[in-house]
Image (cartoon, rainbow, N blue to C red):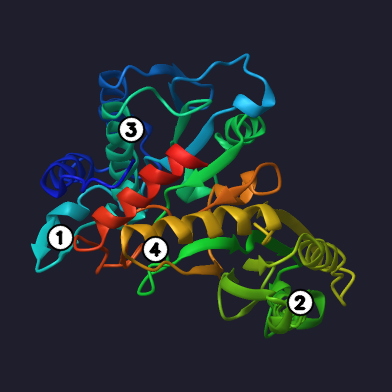
């Protein structure tokens, strides 16, 4: 089962159809066009389909919603949105160079969607759906934090026996992802008092000065040895050089390997107090995705994937990565394995591409996992 070679030309045709439909996260109508196409593939396979609140689509293949725990489905997580704005294709058209297909949204993660459906087609062609069936969630907003889809993802994970995330594998090594850092975004807004910098500087309270102190304090919260990174990535403030600035905003990226570290950093940021009592600090944001911590359940799934890959004639590694995915939401709830999409490189970058020479093997691996997990 799953040993037969997928049809690369058919996969390429499907990927072109998805990638040539631009779908930036901010344009729900565009995202829906991708979802409509994928839903047509699901219907061709006999799926039961549902449009869920918030824009997520759910496709069920041989799933009994009232099945006991041992007969729960395997859940595949996918997203239809990309980071690329409309017009990107005009500058970065799809092109094949050797064994690489370049183009926006290909690696992250439209090829993952295509691979999942080719795995499902292989299963369908070989008999009844696996025990418990397979459920696919196609979400509209993964690239901007999954705010509308998180509840749907967590609800589906609680009813699944395992979660397979078809985000791309690790670039270069093509390893699966057995853990991810939690991701936080904080916004620190400092509200001071404006005054003339030459005539009456003492009447002002500088928001920029307090923000500068906070930059150093916040970045000192990093603990690289524990996997905790903190970066002030944006700073905006002031109105003119001759005005003591009344406003300044910092935007902070936080990555943590454990929930305890996330709670420590969160508490420390919220406890910051300006040294000038006339400056008020407003903190918003927080930990958007919990860490996907390595667990024995994930290790068992990974060991199964490794053994299948060896049977299929290739080796697969497993790595913990700094970026987040929707797998961060499911890992605390259900055994989760990530990075089961298409090999390649260049997520969110101009050289985004899929490795056509390696892609079919990863689809064969996914097919076998769906059959055997």
Q: Earlier in the sequence, mark 2 or mark 1?
A: 1
Q: Earlier in the sequence, mark 1 or mark 4?
A: 1
Using a 10 Å C-alpha cutoff, classify the residue at mark 3 as few (fewer than 14 neighbours), some (14 to 19) or many (20 or more): some
Q: Earlier in the sequence, mark 2 or mark 3?
A: 3
Name the residue rendered at 72%, 72% in the picture.
207
Residue underneath mark 4 = 310
Using a 10 Å C-alpha cutoff, classify the residue at mark 2 as few (fewer than 14 neighbours), some (14 to 19) or many (20 or more): many
Local SS, label 4: helix
- Mark nearest the camera among 3 and 4 is 4
Residue underneath mark 1 = 91
Examine the image and state in which quarter residue 267 appears.
bottom right
- Mark nearest the camera among 2 and 3 is 3
- Mark nearest the camera among 4 and 2 is 4
Quadrant into which the N terminus falls: top left
Left or right, residue 310 beside residue 373: left
Residue underneath mark 2 = 210
Using a 10 Å C-alpha cutoff, classify the residue at mark 4 as few (fewer than 14 neighbours), some (14 to 19) or many (20 or more): few
**Quick one: 304 or 97, which is closer to the camera?**
304
Name the residue rendered at 62%, 17% in the picture.
67
Contact flag, marks 4 and 2 (Cβ < 8 Å): no
Examine the image and state in which quarter residue 59 appears.
top left
Relative to 80, is 286 above or below?
Answer: below
Q: Earlier in the sequence, mark 1 or mark 3?
A: 1
Distance, label 2 to label 3, CA atoms, is 60 Å
Mark drawn on residue 123? 3
**Quick one: 85 or 211, which is closer to the camera?**
85
């Amino acid at each position: 089962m799953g040993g037969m070679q997928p049809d690369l030309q058919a996969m390429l045709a499907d990927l072109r159809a998805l990638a040539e439909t631009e779908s930036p996260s901010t344009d729900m109508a565009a995202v829906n066009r991708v979802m409509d196409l994928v839903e047509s593939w699901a219907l061709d396979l006999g799926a039961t389909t549902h449009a869920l609140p918030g824009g997520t689509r759910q496709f069920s293949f041989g799933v009994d919603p009232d099945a006991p725990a041992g007969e729960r489905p395997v859940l595949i997580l996918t997203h239809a949105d990309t980071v690329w704005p409309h017009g990107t294709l005009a500058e970065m058209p799809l092109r094949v160079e050797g064994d690489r297909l370049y183009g926006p949204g290909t690696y992250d993660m439209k090829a993952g969607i295509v691979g999942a459906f080719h795995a499902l087609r292989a299963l369908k062609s070989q008999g009844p759906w696996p025990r418990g069936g397979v459920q696919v969630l196609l979400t509209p907003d993964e690239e901007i934090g999954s705010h509308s889809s998180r509840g749907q993802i967590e609800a589906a994970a609680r009813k699944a026996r395992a979660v397979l995330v078809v985000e791309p594998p690790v670039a270069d090594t093509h390893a699966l992802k057995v853990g991810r850092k939690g991701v936080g975004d904080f916004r620190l807004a400092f509200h001071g008092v404006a005054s003339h910098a030459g005539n009456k500087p003492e009447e002002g309270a500088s928001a920029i000065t307090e923000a500068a102190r906070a930059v150093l304090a916040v970045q000192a919260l990093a603990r690289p040895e524990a996997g905790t990174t903190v970066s002030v990535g944006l700073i905006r403030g002031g109105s003119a050089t001759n005005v003591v600035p009344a406003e300044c905003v910092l935007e902070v990226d936080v990555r943590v390997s454990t929930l305890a570290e996330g709670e420590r950093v969160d508490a420390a940021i919220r406890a910051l107090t300006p040294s000038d009592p006339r400056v008020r600090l407003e903190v918003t944001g927080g930990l958007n995705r919990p860490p996907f911590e390595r667990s024995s359940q994930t290790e068992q799934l990974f060991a199964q994937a490794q053994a299948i890959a060896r049977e299929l004639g290739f080796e697969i590694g497993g790595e913990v990565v700094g970026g987040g995915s929707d797998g961060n939401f499911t890992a605390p709830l259900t055994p989760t394995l990530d990075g089961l999409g298409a090999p390649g490189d260049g997520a969110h970058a101009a050289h985004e591409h899929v490795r056509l020479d390696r892609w079919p093997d990863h689809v064969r691996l996914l097919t076998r996992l769906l059959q055997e997990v």
